[in-house]
Image (cartoon, rainbow, N blue to C red):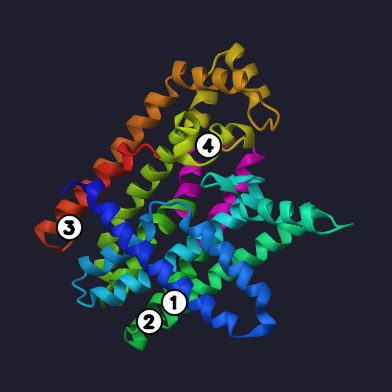
């Protein structure tokens, strides 16, 4: 089976677990008449989570358990969705920070609530209401994630270790988000700072963290977790580089939000940083005018794309992502796993840099 087909099948299984969780959760909440608003928030969260997503994190959560020889497949699949709720918590808050109105082809959570306020309420600051509700629903998603992991049927000692790891994942991601925001305001930065930010904000949270959580619940020791990290960190940075490339050159329908949003936000990505570094004076003027400009035109975005290509930044970023993937794949031989799982990790690593959304 091709890796894409395998991931699609796992995504279907995980989506079924998500639907079952929401069905049970909403039914329980509805029995308490004084919590009707919580029903609406949970239903909105369900729509947000199930509207799209590749389920990379719960798939890696599941595979971390498999790699560490875990046997309770039914329970790990049910528990793996916990990380998808943490992911949604970050996405909802990230959309507020970035002032993004769209996610997964729909309105972002805060923008959806702002629209609701405009239509249903009078004499209200609809934007503030939307942001406030977005923060709350994001927090609710985090609470559900913790609840799922804490109520799983694994040994208490393993759950305690996994919950401690989840705390660390969240703290690293928050630190990475803070680095990202500060880099946006800093003109005197280096590419190493971008990699540091991407390690915290993406690699530890998207690849390493989920693998560790699953492996911990299977009883893996620290040596095994360390071997997973040596594979996961370079792969996670490659994942982010590819994400940044897709964000500029991808298909709007597939990525679910306007192409070029990183340009409008002035994000410090490897793709844009290398373009700035290699640009001539004329190109620098265009980049200075365009990066961080919320009112940028389609033509201006196209000009920036041309600069990214002509400065060699796109080629450099693609090569760097491939180099990191190869570094990750070299570490697979140091992980004590079956040949079948070696094949999965190799194929998954290749998938990271070949995906189109």
Camera-side residue: 200 or 153? 153
Residue plotted at (38% across, 79% down): 161
Q: Are marks 4 and 1 in contact (CB under 8 Å)?
A: no
Residue interval drawn in magenta: 172-200
Q: Are marks 3 and 1 in contact (CB under 8 Å)?
A: no
Tag nearer the camera, 3 or 4: 3
Residue 22 picture location, percent across and down:
48, 71
Neighbourhood count class around disc 1 (C-alpha, 10 Å): few under 14, some 14–19, many 20 upward: some
Q: Are marks 2 and 1 in contact (CB under 8 Å)?
A: yes
Residue plotted at (12% across, 57% down): 340
Question: Residue 190, which numbered label?
Answer: 4
Left or right, 183 with respect to 211, comes to right
Residue 323 picture location, percent across and down:
29, 37
Q: Which mark is first along the chain, 4 or 3? A: 4
Residue under label 1: 148
Question: Residue 334, which numbered label?
Answer: 3
Residue 320 picture location, percent across and down:
35, 34
Most extreme residue toward the right is 123
Left or right, 31 with respect to 340, comes to right
């Amino acid at each position: 089976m091709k890796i894409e087909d395998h991931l699609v099948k796992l995504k279907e299984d995980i989506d079924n677990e998500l639907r079952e969780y929401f069905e049970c959760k909403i039914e329980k909440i509805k029995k308490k008449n004084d919590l009707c608003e919580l029903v609406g928030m949970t239903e909105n969260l369900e729509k947000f989570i199930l509207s799209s997503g590749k389920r990379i994190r719960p798939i890696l959560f599941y595979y971390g358990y498999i790699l560490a020889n875990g046997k309770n497949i039914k329970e790990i699949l049910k528990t793996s969705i916990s990380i998808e709720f943490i992911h949604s918590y970050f996405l909802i808050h990230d959309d507020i920070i970035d002032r993004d109105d769209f996610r997964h082809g729909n309105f972002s959570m805060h923008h959806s609530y702002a629209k609701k306020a405009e239509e249903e309420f009078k004499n209200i600051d609809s934007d503030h209401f939307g942001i406030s509700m977005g923060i709350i629903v994001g927090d609710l998603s985090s609470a559900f994630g913790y609840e799922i992991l804490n109520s799983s049927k694994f040994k208490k000692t393993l759950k305690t270790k996994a919950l401690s790891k989840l705390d660390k994942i969240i703290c690293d991601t928050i630190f990475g988000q803070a680095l990202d925001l500060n880099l946006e305001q800093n003109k005197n930065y280096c590419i190493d700072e971008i990699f540091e930010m991407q390690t915290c904000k993406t690699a530890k949270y998207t690849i390493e963290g989920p693998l560790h959580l699953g492996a911990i619940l299977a009883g893996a020791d620290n040596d095994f977790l360390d071997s997973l990290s040596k594979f996961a960190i370079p792969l996670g940075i490659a994942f982010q580089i590819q994400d940044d490339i897709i964000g500029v050159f991808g298909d709007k329908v597939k990525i679910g939000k306007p192409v070029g949003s990183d340009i409008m936000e002035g994000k410090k990505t490897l793709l844009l940083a290398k373009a700035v570094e290699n640009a001539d004076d004329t190109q620098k003027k265009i980049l200075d005018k365009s990066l961080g400009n919320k009112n940028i035109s389609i033509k201006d975005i196209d000009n920036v794309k041309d600069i990214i290509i002509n400065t060699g930044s796109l080629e450099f970023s693609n090569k760097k992502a491939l180099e990191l993937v190869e570094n990750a794949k070299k570490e697979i031989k140091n992980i004590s796993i079956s040949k079948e799982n070696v094949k999965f990790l190799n194929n998954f690593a290749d998938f990271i840099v070949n995906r189109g959304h």
